[in-house]
Amino acid sequence: SVYSQLENHIWHYGNTAKGLEFDLLTNAPAVTNVSYTPYSTGTGSSIVNPTTGTLIYYSDGKNVIDINHDVMPNGSGLIGAPATFSSGVSCKVPGNCNLWYVFSITTQTEFWPAPVIGNLYYSIVDMSLPGNGSVPVPLGDVVVGQKNILVATNVSEGIEIIPKSGSHDYYLLVGKNSTSSIDIYEVTSS
């Protein structure tokens, strides 16, 4: 399903040059081609303007790619494993329309029965920075000094972000490795 807020109107797939773009009026999908590929063998996230339905950036947890399909300055080298179920997951920094958290995770269960025990990190993307664009038309950048900040250790591949009811904050749910436990973190502006 596609939501009316338009956040889910553009999907990029990491291990191909293909993506899907849904028509803003009919929701009919169209296959797209991108120039920066492959950027992941697993999952990633496409961040789309909820009002206009236009692409802002996408990430696989190792790279952050701008609207022109170029790696953002300081946007490579995120500590994430692109073959995970959910690395590169993003949400806005609450209270700031230009800043985004990108969560990267290093766990890979494909090495089962001895999976790589993972860590969870975050980096901050600032869409007001010029990046590969210009001051009048910024394309964003990963903020120097706000990259690969450790959040948790001994985590599994599964992470999810859920909006917190009644506020602009979020909850980040992270599975603990080799357990049935899920840690819940409140994602705030700090």
Image (cartoon, grey):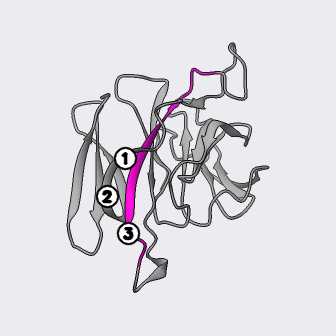
Looking at numbered disc 2 in the image, what kind of residue is underneath it? Thr
- For residue 100, above or below residue 135: below
Residue topped by disc 3: 117
Quarter of the image for the C terminus: give it. Answer: top left
Q: Earlier in the sequence, mark 2 or mark 3?
A: 3
Is residue 24 visible in the rendered image? The answer is: no
Q: Does residue 122 belong to the magenta stretch?
A: yes
Marks 1 & 2, CB-CB < 8 Å contact: yes
Residue topped by disc 2: 153
Looking at numbered disc 1 in the image, what kind of residue is underneath it? Leu
Bounds of the magenta span?
115-129
Relative side of 34 to 139, left or right: right
Is residue 84 visible in the rendered image? The answer is: yes
Q: Residues within 10 Å of mark 3 (few under 14, many from 20)?
A: some
Marks 2 & 3, CB-CB < 8 Å contact: yes
Q: How far apart are marks 2 and 3 (CA)?
A: 8 Å
Q: Earlier in the sequence, mark 1 or mark 3?
A: 3
In the picture, the disc for residue 150 is 1
Main SS category, magenta section: strand
| Residue 123, x across and y down, in percent | 46, 39
- For residue 147, above or below residue 143: below
